[in-house]
Amino acid sequence: MSCKDGKASFTCTCKPGWQGEKCEFDINECKDPSNINGGCSQICDNTPGSYHCSCKSGFVMLSNKKDCKDVDECSLKPSICGTAVCKNIPGDFECECPEGYRYNLKSKSCEDIDECSENMCAQLCVNYPGGYTCYCDGKKGFKLAQDQKSCEVVSVCLPLNLNTKYELLYLAEQFAGVVLYLKFRLPEISRFSAEFDFRTYDSEGVILYAESIDHSAWLLIALRGGKIEVQLKNEHTSKITTGGDVINNGLWNMVSVEELEHSISIKIAKEAVMDINKPGPLFKPENGLLETKVYFAGFPRKVESELIKP
């Protein structure tokens, strides 16, 4: 500062950054209302007689000494996240992993999250890389609920408001005996067709058995080694075949059987897995009507001896 002598007084001229009668007070440029934050884009640091601008972590100062620019750590250090994906964000970066994985800061890698250890499922939980699947014990009458986590009881009652004429007989809840028996009388021109959902962990067992009234013709859909096996026998032919993927995985599988003009088509989840040639109709009509008995999950009588040996 400089001092100018006057009559019985003096006047002090302060250097920039100071104020007061004797220039004893520092001016806080960072709080100057006419120059908000000292003109700094981020941090304004007041110092005795002056001030300077600084940047937050992850930013660098530009040449004007006031504005800050974000540092793109992902571009500067491409391997900063290891095997994970680096995502730049203002002032920082993040290491991202695919769904079902968690980032390990020490190893710089994505590690599988064991969701099963977090009790995600009501009953059985199977963890696999990047995800998990819940299962319910179908043998005890449970199925997976819509939330894919909890289990709900499988209803053993069937709706009675169906328009189709049928006879029902509920006997058991296992492959040891007949679970459901259906009897149809259809016009002569009808061809056999059935579609249903089922789930099991068993590798062997009867899924569907259909036969004519006189037992001379029959169709068997069963499991052998976890795969679909089809047997058919009538006055024209006798065949057995096995194919498709293993489906005794406890998951719901849609199976459809359709008699076409010259073949029988077997589909799983709407995908054809077998197409069996047949020279004539599967079941022979009697008196202008096609009467067929259909059994699910069991045989109506001791017919094992009549089956075709694989």
Image (cartoon, rainbow, N blue to C red):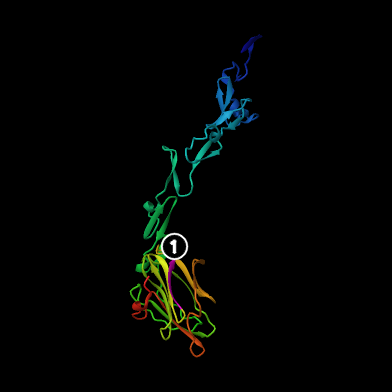
Q: Is residue 194 above or below residue 11?
A: below
Q: Position of residue 23 (x, y in %)?
A: 59, 17
Of residue 226 and residue 198, the one placed in the foreground of this image is 226
Q: Residue at x 40, y 71 (%)?
A: 222
Determine if the magenta segment contains residue 240: yes
Q: Is residue 290 above or below residue 96?
A: below
Question: Magenta-highlighted stretch: main secondary structure?
Answer: strand
The residue that disc 1 covers is: 245
Q: Position of residue 256 (x, y in %)?
A: 49, 71
Q: Position of residue 274 (x, y in %)?
A: 48, 68
Q: Secondary structure at mark 1?
A: loop
61 with respect to 256 (left or right)? right
215 with respect to 275 (left or right)? left
177 with respect to 27 (left or right)? left
Q: Position of residue 211 (x, y in %)?
A: 43, 81
Quadrant (top left/top right/bottom left/bottom right) for the C terminus:
bottom left
Quadrant (top left/top right/bottom left/bottom right) for the N terminus:
top right
Type of amino acid at the residue the image marks with label 1: Asp
Q: Which residues are magenta?
A: 237-245
Q: Residue at x 53, y 82 (%)?
A: 190
Of residue 128 and residue 32, the one placed in the foreground of this image is 128
Of residue 305 and residue 65, the one placed in the foreground of this image is 305
Residue farthest bottom in this picture: 287
Question: On the image, which quarter does residue 170 sit in?
Answer: bottom left
